[in-house]
Amino acid sequence: MEAQRLRDVSTSLIRKMFEIVERARKEGKDIVSLTIGEPDFATPNEVVERAIKAINSGYTHYTSNLGIEELRTVIAERYGVSKDNVMITAGGSEALLNASLAFIEESSKVVIPSPSFLSYFTYAKICKAKITEMKTHDSAFVPDVDLFSEWMSRDVSVVFLNYPNNPTGAVIDERSARAIAEIAMDYNTVIISDEIYDKIYYDRKPTTLADYENVVVVNGFSKSLAMTGWRIGYVVAREDLLNSMLKIHQVNGVCAPAFAQKAVAEVMLNGEFEKIVSRMVLEFRKRRDYIYGELSKLYSTIKPEGAFYMFLNVQENCLEFAEKLIDYGVAVTPGIAFGSGNERFIRISYANSMENLKKAVERIKNFYDSKTT
Ligand code: PLP
């Protein structure tokens, strides 16, 4: 029954981890889950109140496929482009699927750095492309420009980039990011630059690649406004690329929720957006400093510069490690969820309360000590 294109798409790993945690909880175990890929904060009141007002004033129907003009315009201003370069989508994920279906040619190559967000592999598989994984373990989890240049060829239709990065927290330096965009341009290759964590950074400011003709920027408010359930994302791209994505979006997301578009537009227009983000980042920074300070004494890792993840080399099979750690009361995501070469890594998400993080650190230390003594 299932179509060929789904042959290699699997949901089993995430389901397996979920089932293991649920089973342990049912047995009465207290588990701190460091697997969560979303801010633990409630959606800010500023957004919620505006959304309720918008619902009451009739923002409950379709909007234009491209999104409400107010929101497109305020986003466009921030990138220094026209609103005709902006389309609002039902979350970043819809934007990624639209871009994949619009630009990945069947049987072409798609370059995905490893480790990467799992969905990129799924999009490439759905589009029946050949996946080329570019390992980044020896270059602090960002692509090495010379190596990238060697990987590139005429049959690469799309390259995925994601900085700040899920699952490592790495941020690429501006020079390398721009060099990669330029090399890709020489091959007429589209870069899908997933910048969804661009507001969550602790050291250097991430670079946007929105000013390149061959780059589709994917972004959204799931992470920056802690509103993953509201489904507001967007793309910024050259007008003809945007029109190609519109061909998919018009039958896929159709439009993002109207009241949520209105609420986000108002929060951006009145300057509350930046205040909300800095409040959240201040809290994430404390957690990053704490968790990095503690866990880097046990396992090798890079200091995360953005997002809310840390990728640890645990020097053993990641699935076995994750299963055993459950017995100590902590759930983490095994590295194999993020591509090949990650068999000995695990991802932790520090989007969790300081209290839970302290509990998790104590438990991980106990687990670590049980092996070394
Ligand atoms: N891109 C990356 C790198 C992510 O980590 C996520 C969510 O975890 C998304 C995109 C999807 O975001 P959205 O909830 O806006 O679909």
Image: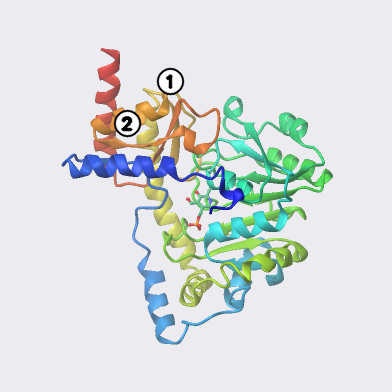
- Dividing the image into 4 quarters, which one contains the C terminus? top left
> Mark 2 falls on what kind of element?
helix
**Can you give x and y, in whole percent of width and height, for residue 200 in the image?**
49, 50
**Which of the two residues, 363 or 209, is positioned nearer the viewer here?**
363
Horizontal side of residue 336 vs 175, given as left or right:
left
Lower position in the chain sequence, tag 2 or tag 1: 1
Identity of the residue drawn at 72% across and 34% down: 148
Q: Nearer the viewer, residue 142 or 257?
A: 257
In the rendered view, would you say 81 is above or below 353?
below
How many numbered badges does the structure rendering display? 2
- Position of 283 compared to 140: left or right? left
- Foreground residue, 324 or 130? 130
Q: Name the residue located 62 percent from the left edge and 63 percent from the top edge.
A: 78
Query: Residue 315 got which mark?
Result: 1
Residue at point 73%, 45% (across, down): 107
Q: Residues within 10 Å of mark 2 (few under 14, many from 20)?
A: some
